[in-house]
């Protein structure tokens, strides 16, 4: 085991970022072992004024969101208006490996340490520094400099249109964002991923980097499957229920499953295959209608969804959600209860995996905080954590004396590799399939790694049949190999022997039964990094549960805080898999950085359920602080007002508007020409505006109903108000920001056509382009892998093809 205290031990980070996305990037690096110094203004970070708070009483040292975001960090206060403090900040930066900044124009513009007003000047002064800029839209494209909040990002990226699925009346039921601050967390995770890739490049080459992250593009990346569908000419899914050609069961595709009402809540089920359906009928005790011709096949069940749903509900209402979930899992049917945060905190599986972390804060007191969803075999992360800093707590430590210069570990690298892609020289064997694993390896491939996808015609990747495969597998090689045969196993072991990383996302136990568990893989290549992702992780009492991402959104309480107030739980939404894909890429990069210093490999176990649970910290802490089980609140916010989505001219056109400050409120009143609201003393602060939300929403609607959604965005943004249209995926695909900014790139796909497909949501200032190529077809790279890499003769390859080993 390494003597280091963390994967990023020795790395020094200055966090010059506010709100959520930038600090979340810093939180990830801190938990991985970096020394993160959070710089706050004298009045404190903005999140100190956001809750939840114990007993609902605001207090700058007791914000649950701030406490979670900033555990394991050090904290100092500096005043940007004071030359002395700007010099102090310059000193901190001079001794840092990484600087994180945020905001539309960048924090450097506000602070100007030593007169350095932008990243270019800073990098000239400190060429070895990694500067990560987390901004709403990046410094490129027509929306550069525009402001955005979680609400605006969720709606502009198309995610809000898909969260609910079809609704009965789109004119009355607007698209909604997810509960919490999911868009800002996505941006923070993407920023951490990009930062770790830049750090790895620095270790290899000695080069610093300026990495710019677009939160809008990071959120668009959550929907790369939808963008790929658009590239192949498919329209956006309709929001009106009556326009959905294929019937839906409980809001999800019939043959896949839905959410059943129970006597104590709801249970999410997914007996999507005919064999699973037969076992589901056993769970129900073979009801009298089991042999009904209307429900005999997947297609017939889909055609008769209304009748089937009524029969299923009559049965489920007689039972507990936990009993049904257990009975379903006993029959190997994906099935989970829709948990509340109260149930999540007492969940036996999460307890067994020690997911929650006890932290006793000197002002707020002791609480259980959601931890991280991954474990590293050779570098265990601490089960305890340092509480978030009090305001200015570490001023004396970092501002009162000299600071030791950070050790520059990059000298062993080759400084001549200017322009090198971050993962040049890294080889990845990709055994994953469908969404989460291929999404992770897509990131690695686009950052320069040689990713070799291994698959077989014997059991092809289910996504191969659709356009999304073209996005999930960009920039990879693809070799055919039948792992069910001993010779196939031996060949993949030969490939692992010359590789750095292997990624798999099968159900728990599958990779071991194949004969490729970590004990086998590490014996073949001791320093290899093996990344395994599964629904509930590879340990704990529920490790063998059958899971799909949409069902885990119910199990973890994620869906429970999203939706319209006082309605049934939302039924699905493809959120979990792409979110976990990004996190898988991030932990892989963390392990690569650790290996670059220590030579150690790792086994990484990531739980999709825990990844979702970790993204709802406010809900989990609110329950502990106040006994409240947070309910969905649509597009409204607990703290900011006005904060909503308002109808515009045209069919199903909406605009998201979020006011986060008094200056934005006054600007909004000016745009909508309501001086009476601007002068109303009861509306001069957010608390007063929250009390009159209905009145303000009505006033907003009076104005927006007559506005084009995009024209209204530009008017509001010109006045400094965060706003953006709520787009479906087809309009996202045509977004001038994605096209002019270069996120969508023309690629010649395997059918010979040229299509615009998604890239990466970040840019390196010294790289002209990412490594973006079209997705391969099965067996495309057989000659390269088997003859060039493994040294087999042409005759031997032909024999293996004939024997259906290379198949």
Image (spheres, grey):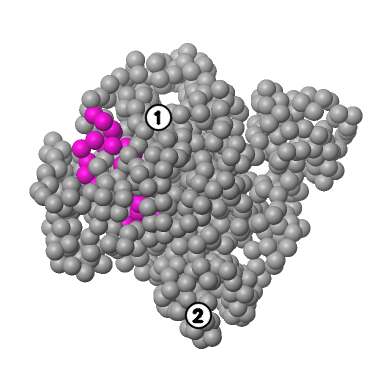
Give the structural element (helix, strand or loop) at label 1.
strand
Indicate the secondary structure of the residue bearing disc 2.
helix
Q: Nearer the viewer, residue 321 or 296?
A: 321
Q: Position of residue 489 (x, y in %)?
A: 45, 17
Please say whether residue 680 is visible from this viewpoint. Answer: yes
Residue 765 position within the rendered picture, expressed as x and y whole percent measured from the top left:
26, 56
Tell me: 144 left or right of 119.
right
Give percent across and percent down for residue 63. Answer: 43, 52
Q: In the figure, 273 relative to 401: above or below?
A: above
Residue visible at 43% across and 74% down?
A: 662
Question: Left or right: where does residue 621 sit relative to residue 520?
Answer: right
- Where is mark 1, residue-wise? 375
- Picture disc at residue 681: 2
Residue range of the region highlighted in magenta in the rendering: 4-33
Q: Is residue 773 above or below residue 140?
A: above
Residue plotted at (42% across, 35% down): 358
Q: Quadrant of residue 32?
A: top left
Q: What residue lies at 73% left-to-right and 46% top-to-bottom?
A: 250
Q: Is residue 576 left or right of residue 66?
A: right
Identify the residue at image location x=32%, y=39%.
Answer: 386
Residue 619 can be seen, yes or no: no
Q: Is residue 513 magenta?
A: no
Measure the C-alpha gap from mark 1 to mark 2. Answer: 52 Å
Can residue 9 be found in the magenta stretch? yes
């Amino acid at each position: 085991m390494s003597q280091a205290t963390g994967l990023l031990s020795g790395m020094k980070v200055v966090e010059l970022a506010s709100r959520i996305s930038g600090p979340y990037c810093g939180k990830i690096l801190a938990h991985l072992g970096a020394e993160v110094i959070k710089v706050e203004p004298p009045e404190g970070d903005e999140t100190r004024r956001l809750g939840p708070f114990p007993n609902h009483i605001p207090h700058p040292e007791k914000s649950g969101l701030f406490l979670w975001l900033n555990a394991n960090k050090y904290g100092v206060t500096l005043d940007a208006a004071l030359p002395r403090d700007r010099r102090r900040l310059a000193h901190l930066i001079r001794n840092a490996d990484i600087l994180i900044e945020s905001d539309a124009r960048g924090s450097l513009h506000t602070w100007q340490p030593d007169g350095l007003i932008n990243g270019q000047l800073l990098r000239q002064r400190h060429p070895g520094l990694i500067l990560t800029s987390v901004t709403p839209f990046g410094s490129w494209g027509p929306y550069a400099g525009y402001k955005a909040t979680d609400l605006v990002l969720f709606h502009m990226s198309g995610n809000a249109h898909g969260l609910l699925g079809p609704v009965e009346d789109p004119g009355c039921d607007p698209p909604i964002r997810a509960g919490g601050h999911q868009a800002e967390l996505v941006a923070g995770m993407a920023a951490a991923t990009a930062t770790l890739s830049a750090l790895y490049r620095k270790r290899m080459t000695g080069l610093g980097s300026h990495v710019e992250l677009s939160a809008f593009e990071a959120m668009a990346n959550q929907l790369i499957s939808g963008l790929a569908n658009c590239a192949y000419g498919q329209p956006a899914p309709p929001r009106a229920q009556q326009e959905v050609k294929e019937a839906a069961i409980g809001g999800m595709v019939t043959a896949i499953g839905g959410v059943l009402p129970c006597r104590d809540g709801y249970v999410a089920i997914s007996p999507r295959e005919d064999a699973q359906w037969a076992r589901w009928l056993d769970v129900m005790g073979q009801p009298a209608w089991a042999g009904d011709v209307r429900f005999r096949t997947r297609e017939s069940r889909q055609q008769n969804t209304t009748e089937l749903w009524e029969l299923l509900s009559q049965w489920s209402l007689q039972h507990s959600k936990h009993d049904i979930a257990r009975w379903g899992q006993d029959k190997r049917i994906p099935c989970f209860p829709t948990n509340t945060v109260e149930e999540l905190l007492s969940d036996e599986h999460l307890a067994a995996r020690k997911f929650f972390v006890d932290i006793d804060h000197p002002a707020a007191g002791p609480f259980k905080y959601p931890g991280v969803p991954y474990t590293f075999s050779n570098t265990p992360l601490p089960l305890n954590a340092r509480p978030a800093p009090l305001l200015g707590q570490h001023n004396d430590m970092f501002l009162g004396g000299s600071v030791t210069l950070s050790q520059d570990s990059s000298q062993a690298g080759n400084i001549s590799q200017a322009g090198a892609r971050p993962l040049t020289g890294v080889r990845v064997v990709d055994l994953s399939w469908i969404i989460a694993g291929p999404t992770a390896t897509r990131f690695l491939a686009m950052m320069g790694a040689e990713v070799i996808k291994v698959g077989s015609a014997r059991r092809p990747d289910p996504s191969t049949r659709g356009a999304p495969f073209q996005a999930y597998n960009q920039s990879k090689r693809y070799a055919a190999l039948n792992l069910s045969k001993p010779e196939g196993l031996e060949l993949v072991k030969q490939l692992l022997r010359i590789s750095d990383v292997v990624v798999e996302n099968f159900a728990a136990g599958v990779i071991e039964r194949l004969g490729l568990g970590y004990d086998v893989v590490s014996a073949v290549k001791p320093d290899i990094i093996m990344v395994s992702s599964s629904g509930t992780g590879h340990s704990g009492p529920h490790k063998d549960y059958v899971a799909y991402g949409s069902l885990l959104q119910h199990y973890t309480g994620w869906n429970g805080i999203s939706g319209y107030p006082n309605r049934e739980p939302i039924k699905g939404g493809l959120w979990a898999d792409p979110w976990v894909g990004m996190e898988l890429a991030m932990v892989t990069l963390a392990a690569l950085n650790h290996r670059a210093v220590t030579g150690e490999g790792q086994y990484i176990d990531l739980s999709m359920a825990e990844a979702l649970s970790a993204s709802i910290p406010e809900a989990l802490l609110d329950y502990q602080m106040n006994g409240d089980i947070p309910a969905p609140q649509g597009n409204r916010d607990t703290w900011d007002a006005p904060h909503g989505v308002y109808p515009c001219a045209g069919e199903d056109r909406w605009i998201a508007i979020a006011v986060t400050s008094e200056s934005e409120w006054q600007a909004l009143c000016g745009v909508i020409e309501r001086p009476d609201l601007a002068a109303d003393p009861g509306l001069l602060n957010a608390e007063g505006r929250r009390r009159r939300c209905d009145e303000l929403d009505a006033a907003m609607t009076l104005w927006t109903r007559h506005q084009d959604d995009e024209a209204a965005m530009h008017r509001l943004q010109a006045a400094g108000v965060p706003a953006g249209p709520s787009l479906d995926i087809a309009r996202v695909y045509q977004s001038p920001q994605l096209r002019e900014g270069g996120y969508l790139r023309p690629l010649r796909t395997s059918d010979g056509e040229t299509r615009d497909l998604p890239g990466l949501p970040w840019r390196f200032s010294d790289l002209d382009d990412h490594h973006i190529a079209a997705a391969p077809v099965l067996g495309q790279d057989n000659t390269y892998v088997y003859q060039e890499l493994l040294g087999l003769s042409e005759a031997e390859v032909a024999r293996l093809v004939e024997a259906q080993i290379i198949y």
